[in-house]
Amino acid sequence: MPQPVCPYCGSDVWLVSSSSLKSDRAGLTYICSRFPDCDARVNCHPGSIKPMGSLGDPQLRRWREKAHKKFDQLWQSGSMSRRQAYCWLAQAMNLPESETHFAQFNQQQCQQAIDLTTVYQRKSYNIAVKHIHTG
Ligand SMILES: [Zn+2]
């Protein structure tokens, strides 16, 4: 795997243990070697050195977290499985499922995922209400 470089400043990227970054997460994190001046990072898949996506700065990471939380409501509500939810999102965003991961999204895609999820939730709410009214 090619060693990633920081997409923000082009510096080398270090692989460090997540716990060294005051995270309570076990595992490894890629972080820009200019940290803390540049705080771009991405976590690895559990038990591997494979990054979960692309390095994100604090702002992008907040967007990803926000979009992820919103999206998780879809399958946590039990109206569909997690797998179905990702399949739906991939189709709605016109992305291959292999690229439908929040850790790979840019800010625009995060916003798009939030909007799509909101519309979907509103629609299924309307359908549920209709069911109640029509008995
Ligand atoms: Zn950097």
Image (cartoon, rainbow, N blue to C red):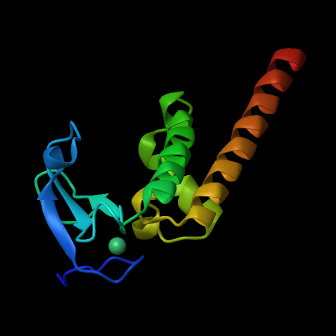
x, y (%) of residue 75? 50, 36
**Nearer to the camera, 38 or 125:** 38
x, y (%) of residue 113? 61, 54
Quadrant in the picture for the N terminus: bottom left
Residue in the picture at 34% in, 65% down:
37
Residue 85 vs 6, above or below: the answer is: above
Q: Residue furthest front?
A: 37
**Nearer to the camera, 84 or 71:** 71
**Nearer to the camera, 124 or 54:** 54
Residue 128 vs 11, above or below: the answer is: above
x, y (%) of residue 87? 50, 56
In which of the image's four quarters is ligand 1 placed? Answer: bottom left
Residue in the picture at 17% in, 69% down:
14
Query: To which quarter of the image does residue 57 belong?
Result: bottom left
Quadrant in the picture for the C terminus: top right
38 sits left or right of 4 in the view: right
55 sits left or right of 4 in the view: right
32 sits left or right of 40 in the view: left
> How many numbered markers are drawn?
0
Query: To which quarter of the image does residue 73 belong?
Result: top right
x, y (%) of residue 115? 70, 51
Residue in the picture at 37% in, 69% down:
54
Residue in the picture at 44% in, 69% down:
99
